[in-house]
Structure formats: C-alpha cells, structure tokens
Image: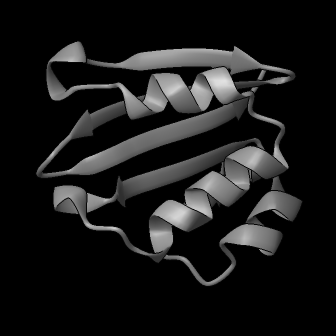
Amino acid sequence: MEAAIDSCASDSDRITLADDGNTIVAEGIGIDGETDESIEQLVCVLVYLGAPDSLFAHLDSTRAIDGRQEDEFGEYTAAWTFHPDDGVNMTITTN
C-alpha cells in the first residue's frame, strides 16, 4: 500500500496511508464533479493495487442514495460513499 501511495499520491492531502500502512483513506475525491488531480491519483492507486474493471464500473455508477458500497479484489477491500457535495470517500484495507 505504501508503494501505491509513493507511486501515485505522495503529494496528496486527500489520499493518505493509515493503520500502520494497512489502509488507504481517500477523502473528498472529485467534489462537485470537479475533475482534479485527486481523481487521477485515486485511479492510479486502484490500478497499482490491481483493481478490476468491474470495481471502476461499480464506483462510476454509485449514486448518493446508494449508501456505502463495497468491493473485494485480490487481498483488498474497497468501501466508499459518494455525494455530489462531498465527492468520493473511500477506504481500501488489506483483507
């Protein structure tokens, strides 16, 4: 996980490492539909960790009324919420 952060989001204040390197926390990604560097960084982290296309499709189709969503891939679990005012908030943990 640390390598994913170092490679993709080392300068981000929205994507950070937590829990002694066992969790990645992403907060406020793409607020108000903005396309910003944090979206690209989160995608990079997910690709680095081996997230499948199905996770990206699930993430892309999440609506605010859907509540918390979760997908497992490889040795990781990604859980997220989305709201237009708050963007995507995601945690990625090792299983």
Residue at (82%, 43%) from the top-left corner?
Answer: 49
Q: Is residue 36 visible?
A: yes
User: Is residue 87 or residue 91 the one in the foreground?
Assistant: 87
- Vertical placement of 61 versus 43: above or below? above
Horizontal side, residue 84 vs residue 67: left or right: left
Position in image of residue 8 (x %, y %): 72, 69
Q: Where residue 50 sits in the image (x, y, percent)?
A: 83, 37
Name the spot of residue 6 as percent of width and height, x first: 80, 73
Closer to the camera in the image, 79 or 54: 54
- Residue occupying the point 35% across, 45% down: 88
Give the residue at x 26% y 66%.
Answer: 34
- Quadrant, the C terminus: top right
- Figure quadrant of residue 28: bottom left
**Measured from the top left, where is residue 35 in percent x and y?**
35, 68
Task: Kindly identify the residue that appears in the image at 74 percent across and 27 percent down.
Answer: 52
* Colouring chosen for the image of the structure: one colour
Q: Is residue 66 above or below residue 7?
A: above
Residue 16 visible to the viewer: no
Q: Is residue 21 left or right of residue 3?
A: left
* Left or right of residue 15, residue 35 in this image: left
Is 19 rendered above or below residue 3? Answer: above
